[in-house]
Amino acid sequence: MRYLDPKADLTFKKIFGEHKDLVISFLNAMITFEDKAKIESVEYLSPEMIPDTPMKKYSIVDVMCKDEFGRLFIVEMQMIWTPEFKERILRNTAKAYSNQLPAGVEYGECKPVYSLCLINEAVYKDDDEFYHHFVLTDKTNGNRILDGLNIIFIELPKFKADSVSDRKMQVLWLRFLTEINESTFEIPSEFTENKEISKALEIVKGFAFSDKQMLTYYKFWDTVAVAKLFDKDYVEARSMKRGLEKGLRQGLKQGIAQGIEQGIEQGIKISTIETAKKMLSKGIEIESIADITGLSTDEILSLRQDL
């Protein structure tokens, strides 16, 4: 294997969490700053306020940094889209902003926060736009903006290189993320001719990683695959539950409603148990299974004995 997929936890963090020049190039390519003040330098910060494993809300927090202007940047590679992820991004962006205000600090000293979220699924099915920059605006006048909080979603499956003509580095970085993987053998000349992309390619070469790191890499993708299966089963079960609840509200008797409710919950529980068994068979750690399924450690240990 010549190259590893740069979207994986191991590789993404290595590229952007260990090489300041690359994260500077990446952020400048992905974000359009209103004042035209591009990032020149960054200081890495600890992202401890956010889960740092793919099993906690299926998310990977790779980079949190601050530039020379004091602006804060959170970068995440999101493998699976869930409604909870959107809520968590809102909370964490607001938390990063409010954490700038220890006792005695004036409000006017707060700097903008940018949460850049690369999503490996299509989120908004009603349009083809892959880039979404959210800010706080007046509902009656979109030109009135409260500065400070910026959330940017980039839907990788929707990205097409020919849809962006005026941002060369944005195209190159997004092509790098979407085109490079274990099946890559031929590298486009545009990649090797660009200093930052060429450096990123060297970082994700397979021979640069130890056997232990490769085991972590493969386990990550196994975990993502199982998490997707669980998420699909869970969403379908919940959708069925909501549909039946709507019907119940329209006239079914309370006793019948309670019976169906209990049956639905039991069905969801059975589906969760089956998913946990699949994850155990894949060798996924018990703690990770508990994070995804909501089952207790004792329940999972009991399931393992039955395999």
Image (tube, helix red, strand yellow):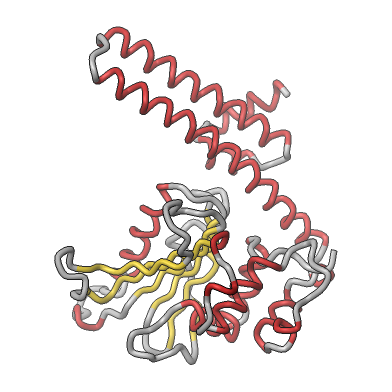
Which of these two is toward me, 23 or 285? 23
On the image, the x and y values in percent for residue 7 come to: 63, 63
- Classify the position of the C terminus by image quarter: top right
For the point 64% across and 25% down, the residue is: 303
- Most foreground residue, 129 or 298: 129
> Quick one: quadrant of the N terminus?
bottom right
Q: Is residue 40 left or right of residue 201?
A: left
Which sits in the foreground, 300 or 10?
10
Figure quadrant of residue 105 = bottom left
Q: Please tell me whether residue 62 is drawn above or below residue 231 in the rendered image.
A: below
Q: Residue at x 41, y 81 (%)?
A: 32
Is 106 displayed left or right of 12 in the figure? left
The number of numbered badges drawn on the structure is: 0
Decide which of 227, 109 is in the foreground and name it: 227
Relative vertical location of residue 282 with respect to residue 2 in this rendering, above or below = above
Residue ranking furthest to the left:
140
Task: Give coordinates of residue 107: x percent, y percent.
Answer: 19, 78
Which quadrant of the view contains residue 298? Answer: top right
The residue sitting at 45% across, 68% down in the picture is: 131
Q: Residue at x 49, y 89 (%)?
A: 41
Q: Is residue 27 left or right of residue 109?
A: right
Q: Residue 222 location, x and y as percent?
A: 70, 46
Q: Position of residue 100 (x, y in %)?
A: 30, 75
